[in-house]
Amino acid sequence: MASEVDICNLALSHIGDEATVSSIDPPEASFQAGLCARFYPIARDSLLQMHNWNFGSKRVNLAQVTNVWPEWEYAYAVPGDCVTIVSVLPPDAANDYATQFVPTDSPAFGHNYAPLISAGQYVPQPYAVEADTLGAGVIYTNQASAMLRYQSLVSDPTKFTPLFVMTLSWHLASMLAGPIIKGDIGSAEAKRCLQMMAGYLSQARTSDSNMRNIKVEHIVPWSAGR
């Protein structure tokens, strides 16, 4: 598994810098280490926001706070390590989708007393996120005892997948290219690194998504009886 220093040295190698760093927290006394210490967290955290990575996915029961908006029934504190909110769920939700029995004796089916059928029911609930007067994030929703699925801030690089590491190293390289190489050449190199990062990001997203086996079939009443 790669360390923060490994990822930084990989990023430096992408732009042809022969220097290596041995510490970024705290940074050693080198120009490259100082840049890596400054830009690595930015590169990591922004990349975490670009996809709902499996290694950063969490579910928690939310802590209720004072609700100041009558438009919503409940208010909850945003978890401190939350990077991206994925969905607000009922407390007993097994996943983001559940099944609901839909009667086929509705007028849409043209007959009565038919057996019940199972149809896809979208479970995630509507919500809004705002900051309170102290700047803390608050989730407003009509869901009682809400559960949250979210993308968490993962700082431990041993949790990263190999493709995420490669994507992060190119993302970081794009930030290092300008300060290290400078001028038009540095700008061109930063653009090249971003292109490489985009290619690896596509592969990393696909690989990460393939680790899930969630196939949702949306069934509307007019087609459920077919």
Image: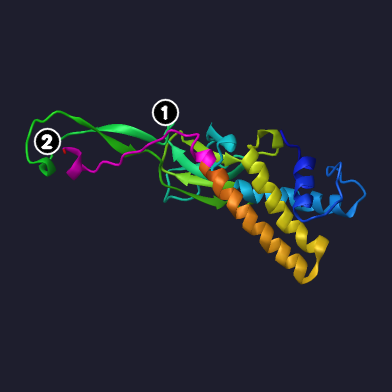
**Which residue has dot 2 on it?**
105
User: Residue 39, can we see it?
Assistant: yes
**Which residue has dot 1 on it?**
92
Please give the label number shown on residue 171: none
Tell me, yes or no, whether the highlighted magenta stretch contains residue 226: no
Tell me, yes or no, whether the highlighted magenta stretch contains residue 220: yes
- The residue located at (57%, 44%) in the rendering is 204
Where residue 203 sits in the image (x, y, percent)? 56, 46
Helix or strand or loop: what does disc 2 sit on? loop
Where residue 76 sits in the image (x, y, percent)? 52, 41
- The residue located at (85%, 51%) in the rendering is 18
Where residue 105 sits in the image (x, y, percent)? 11, 36
Where residue 217 sits in the image (x, y, percent)? 31, 39
Q: Is residue 42 left or right of residue 198?
A: right
Question: Where 111 falls versus 181 (above or below)?
Answer: above
- The residue located at (59%, 54%) in the rendering is 198
Q: Amino acid at mark 1?
A: Asp
As rendered, which of 99 and 92 lies closer to the eye?
99
- The residue located at (18%, 29%) in the rendering is 116
Question: Where 6 falls versus 46 (above or below)?
Answer: above
Helix or strand or loop: what does disc 1 sit on? loop
Sequence order check: which comes first, mark 1 or mark 2?
1
Asked if disc 1 and disc 2 are in contact, CB closer than 8 Å, the reply is: no
Quarter holding the N terminus is: top right
From the image, give the main secondary structure of the stretch colored magenta.
Answer: loop
Instruction: Specify start and end residues of the magenta stretch as a single range.
Output: 207-225
Question: Where 172 falls versus 120 (above or below)?
Answer: below
Instruction: Tell me the distance, in whole angstroms, between the alpha carbons under discs 1 and 2.
Output: 29 Å
Instruction: Give the image quarter of residue 195.
Output: bottom right
Q: Is residue 60 left or right of residue 9?
A: left
